[in-house]
Image (cartoon, rainbow, N blue to C red):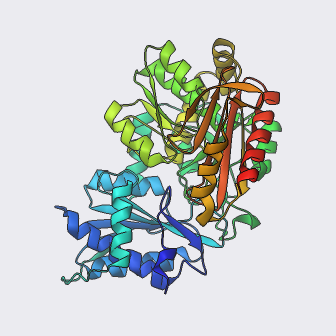
């Protein structure tokens, strides 16, 4: 068996089911047990949850076998469950960690594993490197068998979120799309229990996710967008497969770009509190402008919520997130949480419609436009291609003078006119990603074309 197939990327290990086998999952379980034993913890308990994929409960059971055999107790939920609930449970109950069986937004032929250590945040490279080392160099732990319990971890979490956002949602009508994922019956019920009127769509279990991927982006949310256009709700909210990400739909703008969602939620929180923001290198500089206007600052980190989480802690950030729809806030776990952000978006819209809030932001700080693109790229070629891209950067890009090149994560070209383009390898798929920002669609389209051309020349 090729153990090199097990590789923890930006957010855990994901693979197609021909690679993501019960035997390899067992190896990961043994590695997590060895890691937990190496770091030690007062409470030898791990929570294990899974998403709504057909194969996920079986994989979760196998992981539970490995963990209990190593002397740790295991907590299960009685249904598929959002990733952020596992992260919050780790902190709430002081557990040694959490294991989540999920491939997040990937299509049905994938599955995956996320490991969340005792700090309730995504595992940093030193943790995942250690796991990969234990996979390649197994250590057998002899111990009395741990116990398995099934408990309610959902209600304590939803009570916490209601208290944290602390807003009566009576008077707002929402359409919620779970995309057949684990937010089903949790995000929508939380909104209802807070006073909102909620219409739920695609809210039944379907391991094939309706024949698509449970990724909350515009092309996958046509039903939700049409519902809002038809006046079925004031805003639409969708979660991805494991409900750690969110998308919001408004009447005027349709599916909000993740950059605008970040901006409007941070501006809303600044009405209530103060503090810096943390954003990834692929996320809009609009966040920096908003922060500075409120006497705050923004911190830029590499792509991956683990880096957002780390910076949120060191800077005591009010809000942090990524353009892909993953966010968290002060007072909560430092893990992206699409259930919490659904509640926050509804609260912000209740005071003033999100479209009106965005209009004011763009009027004050200037228009922004963002486009993203992906190009297929073999995993083994990514490093060399990125090196070639960096070597081909000159003094101009898309006809504009280059002000600076940022190599924090990939190659980010910042231009004199304030626009930028980022080219970086995906950490979860065999693709090179392109992110762009400018003050017009014409500019960002040209940036995408130039970036695509440059990458293809290097492949």
- Give the residue displayed 56% in from the left and 48% down from the top: 245
Could you say which quadrant of the image residue 358 lies in? top right
The C terminus: image quadrant: bottom right
Tell me: residue 135, above or below residue 307.
Answer: below
**Figure label count:** 0
Task: Give whichever of 227, 28 is nearer the camera.
Answer: 28
Residue 419: x %, y % from top left: 68, 26
128 relative position to 220: left or right: left
- Give the residue displayed 62% in from the left and 62% down from the top: 381
Spot the residue most to the left.
42
Residue 292: x %, y % from top left: 49, 16
- Give the residue displayed 45% in from the left and 78% down from the top: 25
234 relative position to 326: left or right: right
Task: Give whichever of 406, 360 is nearer the camera.
Answer: 406
Residue 330: x %, y % from top left: 38, 34
Residue 188 visible, this orientation: yes
Tell me: residue 357, above or below residue 110.
Answer: above
Task: Give whichever of 360, 165 is nearer the camera.
Answer: 360
Task: Give whichever of 282, 378 is nearer the camera.
Answer: 378
Tell me: residue 395, above or below residue 99.
Answer: above
279 relative position to 250: left or right: left
């Amino acid at each position: 068996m090729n153990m090199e197939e097990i590789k923890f990327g930006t957010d855990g290990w994901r693979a197609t089911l021909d690679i993501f086998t019960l035997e390899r999952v067992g190896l990961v379980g043994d590695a997590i047990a060895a890691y937990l034993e190496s770091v030690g913890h007062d409470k030898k308990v791990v929570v294990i949850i899974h998403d709504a994929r057909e194969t996920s409960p079986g994989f979760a059971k196998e992981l539970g076998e490995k963990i209990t055999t190593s002397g740790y107790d295991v907590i299960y939920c009685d249904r598929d469950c959002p990733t952020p609930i596992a992260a919050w449970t780790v902190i709430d109950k002081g557990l040694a960690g959490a294991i989540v069986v999920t491939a997040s937004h990937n299509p049905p032929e994938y599955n995956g594993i996320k490991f969340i250590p005792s700090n309730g945040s995504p595992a940093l490279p030193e943790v995942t490197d250690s796991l990969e080392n234990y996979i390649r160099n197994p250590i057998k732990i002899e111990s009395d068998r741990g116990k398995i319990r099934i408990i309610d971890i959902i209600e304590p979490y939803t009570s916490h979120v209601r208290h944290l956002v602390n807003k009566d949602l009576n008077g707002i009508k929402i359409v919620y799309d779970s995309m057949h994922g684990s937010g089903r019956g949790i995000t929508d019920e939380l909104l209802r229990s807070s006073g909102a009127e909620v219409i739920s769509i695609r809210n039944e279990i379907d391991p094939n996710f309706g024949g698509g991927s449970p990724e909350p982006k515009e092309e996958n949310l046509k039903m939700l967008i049409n519902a809002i256009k038809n006046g079925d709700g004031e805003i639409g909210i969708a979660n991805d497969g494991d409900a750690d990400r969110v998308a919001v739909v408004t009447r005027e703008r349709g599916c909000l770009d993740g950059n605008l969602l970040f901006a409007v939620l941070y501006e809303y929180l600044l009405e209530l509190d103060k503090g810096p923001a943390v954003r990834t290198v692929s996320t809009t500089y609009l966040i920096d402008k908003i922060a500075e206007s409120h006497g705050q600052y923004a911190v830029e980190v590499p792509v991956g919520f683990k880096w957002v989480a780390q910076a949120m802690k060191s800077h005591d950030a009010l809000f942090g997130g990524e353009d892909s729809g993953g966010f968290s806030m002060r007072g909560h776990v430092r893990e992206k949480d699409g259930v919490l952000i659904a509640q926050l978006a509804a609260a912000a819209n209740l005071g003033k419609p999100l479209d009106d809030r965005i209009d004011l932001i763009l009027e004050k700080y200037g228009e922004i436009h963002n486009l993203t693109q992906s190009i297929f790229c073999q995993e083994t070629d990514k490093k060399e291609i990125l090196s070639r891209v960096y070597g081909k950067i000159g003094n101009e890009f898309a006809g504009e003078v280059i002000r600076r090149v940022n190599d924090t994560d990939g190659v980010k070209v910042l231009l004199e006119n304030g626009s930028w383009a980022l080219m970086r390898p995906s950490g979860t798929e065999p693709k090179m990603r392109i992110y762009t920002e400018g003050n017009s669609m014409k500019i960002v389209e040209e940036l995408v074309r130039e970036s695509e051309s440059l990458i293809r020349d290097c492949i």
